[in-house]
Image (spheres, rainbow, N blue to C red):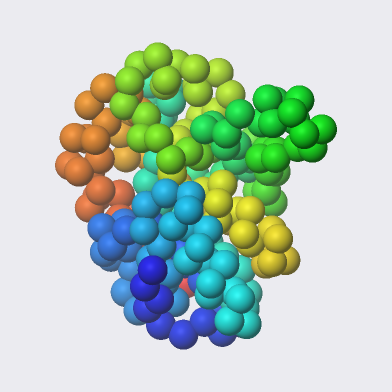
Amino acid sequence: MHLIGTITPDRPLLVIAVEEEAAHLGDGLPVLLTGIGKVNASVALATVLARGERPAEIVNLGTAGALRPGLAGTHLISRVVQHDLDTPVLHDLTGRTYGADLTLDGPPDGLVLATGDLFVSDEQARERLAARADLVDMEGYAVATVAERAGVPVRLVKQVSDEAGEGASRSWRESVDGCAKLLADWVRVHLG
């Protein structure tokens, strides 16, 4: 976890997994680098919010793998799901729901993001996820959950870096800098 800048109640906090995705942001807004995965994202954001530092909103920026061919660009997420938690089994065991889908304030036709700690690199996993989501990442659900529980508005903004499935890790390394530039452009236009 690394916080760059000062959190104030009149500005958003940008929450990003890794430095590579934040490379072109500049120093206009505070940035929280969480590390990769749901646990790192949850702990980092919860720690900052527990200190009493309250931003106007939380904006989770990052790359995501496309679950369908041809999907590209920068997208505001409308719903986020956890793809690596067996919610139906847990409900059957306990009678309670854990890891329910989260609907976010966003465009009604916005995309669905599947979050999990598993890097989706095989075709069978990609096809299974494509039945319920458009994009896949490793932090969005965690950031949205922490923000929701803390009562802070949240937006998830994802730049498609590659197509999830075989070869995705190679494609991510090749495309992350270009994605970081596009995410920085989004910030200038929407949060300027």
Image quarter (top left, top right, bottom left or bottom right) of the N terminus: bottom left
Outermost residue toward the front? 93
The image position of residue 18, as x and y in percent, is 32, 58
The image position of residue 141, as x and y in percent, is 56, 47
Residue in the image at 57% along x and 34% along y: 85
**Left or right, 158 with reference to 2:** right
Q: Is residue 28 visible?
A: no
**Left or right, 77 with reference to 1:** right
Outermost residue toward the right? 95
Q: Is residue 98 above or below residue 50?
A: above
Residue in the image at 74% along x and 28% along y: 93
Q: Nearer the viewer, residue 116 or 86?
A: 86
Find residue 78 and report its image quarter: top right
Q: Is residue 69 visible?
A: yes
Count the marks: how many? Answer: 0
The image position of residue 34, as x and y in percent, is 41, 62
**Left or right, 109 with reference to 168:** right
The image position of residue 25, as x and y in percent, is 33, 68
Q: Nearer the viewer, residue 66 or 146?
A: 146
Q: Is residue 139 above or below residue 136?
A: below
Q: Nearer the viewer, residue 139 or 98?
A: 98
Residue in the image at 70% along x and 40% along y: 98
Residue in the image at 37% along x and 46% along y: 63
**Left or right, 186 with reference to 108:** left
